[in-house]
Image: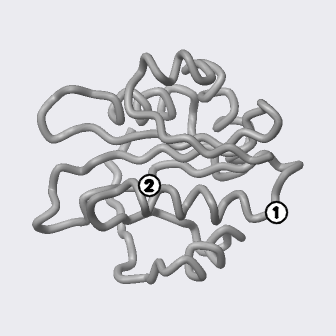
Amino acid sequence: MLNIETILNMESLEQNIGKAALIDFLHTHLDRFRDTKSAITKAIDYAFSADPGRGGYIITAKKDGKLVGAVVMNNTGMQEFIPEYYLIYIAVDASERGQGIGAKLLQKAFDTADGDIALHVEYDNPAKRLYERMGFSTKYAEMRWQRSK
């Protein structure tokens, strides 16, 4: 049986699965779209920050007690000019894909957010089709300038 839970603070995360376990899960199951463990840690810390203009939540999906999916949502604090929430990470265990877990995680994210949601997805990411089916649309092309290193 699939159990989907919203986690609102670090204490609950530690009781639910543990921060380190969530970082490892995301780092593994984001596959080729993964970020470093350091970047994942920063997104989780931001979600649970008490600093003004920060915050968010995490959603987990467990099947028979095993973590099979997770979402990290950050509150942008900028609702007047960009969406209130940014979906930073969503991942489903590779062995559990194709069973609707991603859609259920997204629906829980929609139900939990009290504002609009944006996300970044690469054009060749197979999950892009799921996002479109769930109602996301392409509004802008993201462009980046990077300082030489």
Q: For the C terminus, give its image quadrant.
A: top left
Across and down, in percent, residue 39 comes to 47, 33
Across and down, in percent, residue 104 comes to 63, 61
In the depicted view, which residue is nearer to us: 88 or 123?
88
Q: Quadrant of residue 66?
A: top right
Residue picked out by circle 2: 87
Position of residue 129 relative to residue 78, above or below, is below
Locate residue 40 relative to residue 10 in the image: left or right.
Answer: right
Q: Quadrant of residue 60?
A: top right
In the depicted view, which residue is nearer to us: 39 or 14?
14
Locate residue 108 relative to residue 81 in the image: left or right.
Answer: right
Mark 2: give few (<14), some (14-19) or many (20+) Cα within 10 Å.
some
Position of residue 8 relative to residue 93, above or below, is above
Residue name at image x 68 percent, y 45 percent: 69
Residue picked out by circle 1: 99
Residue name at image x 36 percent, y 69 percent: 143
Residue name at image x 51 percent, y 57 percent: 108
Mark 1: give few (<14), some (14-19) or many (20+) Cα within 10 Å.
few
> Seen from this angle, which residue lies furthest front?
1
In the depicted view, which residue is nearer to us: 17 or 1?
1
Locate residue 65 relative to residue 136 in the image: left or right.
Answer: right
Distance, label 2 to label 1, CA atoms, is 21 Å
Nearer to us of marks 2 and 1 is: 1
Instruction: Classify mark 2: helix, strand or loop.
Output: strand
- What's under tag 1, amino acid-wise? Gln
Position of residue 96 relative to residue 25, above or below, is below
- Disc nearer the start of the sequence (2/1): 2
Q: Residue 62 bears which disc, if any?
A: none
Residue name at image x 39 percent, y 78 percent: 141
- What's under tag 2, amino acid-wise? Leu
Instruction: Classify mark 1: helix, strand or loop.
Output: loop
